Amino acid sequence: MTAHASDDWLVVDTGLRAADENMALDKALLLAMLENRTPNIFRFLRFEESALVGYHQSPEQELNLEFCRAQGIAVQRRLTGGGALIFDPTQIGWELVCRRDALPQGDMASLSRKICEAAAAGLSLLGVRAQFRPRNDIEVEGRKISGTGGIMDGDVLLFQGTVLVDLDIPRMLRVLRVPLEKLDAHAVSSVAERVTSLKALLGKAPELMVVQKALLDGFRAQLGLSFVQGDLPDAVAALLPEALAKVRDAEWLGINHRARDDMPLRKATLRAPGGTLQAEMLWDNYGNRVRQVHFSGDYFIQPQRAIVDLEAALRNVHLNDVDGIIAGLFEEQAVDGFGLQPEHFATVLRMAAKDA
């Protein structure tokens, strides 16, 4: 391993790997860090085609498992929370595995913001206007280009994110259970209004090394981190076989098994003074939660980005909390719905929740 100063972060690129290897490496990195056997690490990772569910999610509810099996798409569970993701070799994963005191102090919400702002600053060096979007996304002009998530284990942090270098939206819709009933041109267009990639923004996909350098430059500038390139520490490699056995065990993927029918797709339409408002959502019967929602209809709203911000804020929230979340966003952004009020959005969500 390359020699480095104690305050340097070790940058490791673990290359293109199967999903189970990448998840096992996360476990091994965390354990080695907890045992104080490795410096703070910034890891770049890439995946063979795979679908990853968040730690608290059920694969049966989040993914089209039949399609994954037929297409040879690996299914794995992350250590971190958040929503289901698809990965393929064109995308870049990045993560920080470190002691908590290596980063600015504050709660997880403020730390997440600082880390996302550093990543956004790096991506902006590529010629896009990236910025943080609460709670844990990075966007360009209202469209998501990176999702992030993190966990604390004792005084050790694992925080990870993605960069959508390229994106096959029709294939993504086949893999994920999204609140869109038809895999048609309208569905693809609707997702394209909310998600983007570096290739779509720049006209061509930048080289992976260029993206990696930009990200590191962003973290240097925003958080004052210093880096040295190196290899995976021997202590981590030694822990990998046991970690790999754990993530390959059926119990790991089955931690949060719940029936697909317990999270149905639901839809409702409300005719309000400001127009017709439709909500399509994934509804979690088990937790009485809105897992994901898509608003559409015949209405006007300013600022235009209010809808995508609202959809982001309403991911995985309890039905009892939607009123406060919607009202807060309307106030924060001075939203003008031309007759549509916060209570109309809350009402259509409740209507969808009751829709069998």
Image: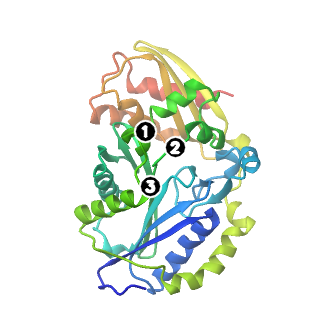
Reply above or below: 341 against 216. Answer: above
Asked if the residues shown at circle 2 and circle 1 are in contact, with their CB atoms under 8 angstroms apart, the answer is yes
Asked if the residues shown at circle 3 and circle 2 are in contact, with their CB atoms under 8 angstroms apart, the answer is no
Taking depth in this image into account, of 141 and 268 the one nearest to the observer is: 141
- As helix, strand or loop, the secondary structure at mark 3 comes to strand
Q: Is residue 290 visible?
A: yes
Among numbered discs 1 and 3, the one appearing first in the sequence? 3
- Quadrant hosting residue 23: bottom right
Q: Residue at x 32, y 85 (%)?
A: 4
Residue, disc 3: 148
Q: Residues within 10 Å of mark 1 (few under 14, many from 20)?
A: some
Residue 328 position, x and y percent, is 34, 37
Residue 167: assigned label: 2
Reply above or below: 290 against 307. Answer: below
- Quadrant hosting residue 304: top left
Viewed as shown, does residue 269 lie left or right of 7? right
Q: Residue at x 41, y 79 (%)?
A: 230
Asked if the residues shown at circle 1 and circle 3 are in contact, with their CB atoms under 8 angstroms apart, the answer is no
Residue, disc 1: 200
Whole-angstrom CA distance, mark 1 to mark 3, is 20 Å
Viewed as shown, does residue 70 lie left or right of 215? right
Taking depth in this image into account, of 205 and 68 the one nearest to the observer is: 205
Q: Residue at x 52, y 34 (%)?
A: 293
Q: Residue at x 30, y 22 (%)?
A: 336
- As helix, strand or loop, the secondary structure at mark 1 comes to helix
Q: Is residue 351 visible?
A: no
Reply above or below: 115 against 283. Answer: below
Residue 312 position, x and y percent, is 44, 40
